[in-house]
Amino acid sequence: FLNASGQDRFVLVQEIIDIAYELADSKLIFESVDLIYTGLDQSTSTRHTRDLIYLLGSVVSTNKDLALQQKALNYLLTDFEQLYKHSEVRPEVFRIIGNLKLEMM
């Protein structure tokens, strides 16, 4: 994963998430979310950032684990300023944060 870049990294993360759900392995799901964060932190293109944000939204919407939701919310709020700069992903970031806040109430 660390040697991959761009679209290859996105595909790898997506495959890891698919495997984690097939195995119902919550630890692997947590690790895959960490990979999404790493990808977001290292993303150099708006397209990859957008793809990773959509992937994160998909993961947290299908997984009702409170710890995972809290972790995703903390990440999004911590990096909000950086993510806000990408106007293409801004609505999706707001949607994910809103959904997470509602789920956690």
Image (cartoon, helix red, strand yellow):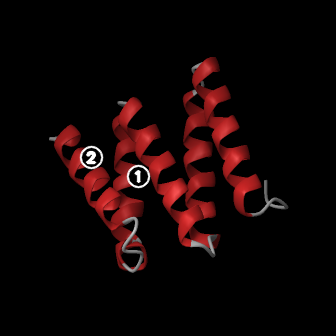
Quadrant of residue 52 in the image? bottom right
Tag 2 or tag 1, which sits nearer the N-term? 1
Residue found 62% across the figure and 44% down from its top: 31
| Residue 72 image label | 1
Which amino acid, mark 2?
Leu
Q: Is residue 46 above or below residue 22?
A: below
Please give left or right for residue 29 compared with residue 8 in the image: left
Residue 100 is labelled as 2
On the question of residue 65 being in view, the answer is no
Q: State how far apart marks 1 and 2 are (Cα).
A: 8 Å
Residue 33 position (above or below residue 20): below
Q: Residue at the location (39% across, 65% down)? A: 89
Q: Identify the residue shown where x is 26% and y is 60%.
A: 94
Tell me residue 63's x, y (percent).
41, 31
Is 64 situated left or right of 104 in this image? right
In the image, farthest residue toward the top: 23
Image coordinates of residue 49 in percent, x first then y, are: 53, 64
| Mark 1–mark 2 CB contact (< 8 Å) | yes
Locate the C terminus and report the quarter of the image it occupies. Answer: top left
- Which amino acid is tagged 1? Ala
Q: Secondary structure at mark 2?
A: helix
Q: Position of residue 43 (x, y in %)?
A: 62, 70
Q: Is residue 43 above or below residue 57?
A: below
Q: Residue at x 73, y 45 (%)?
A: 12
Q: How many marks?
A: 2
Residue 9 placement (x, y as % from top left): 73, 54
Query: In this rendering, is residue 33 above or below 5?
Result: above
Q: Quadrant of residue 42?
A: bottom right
| Mark 1 secondary-structure assignment | helix
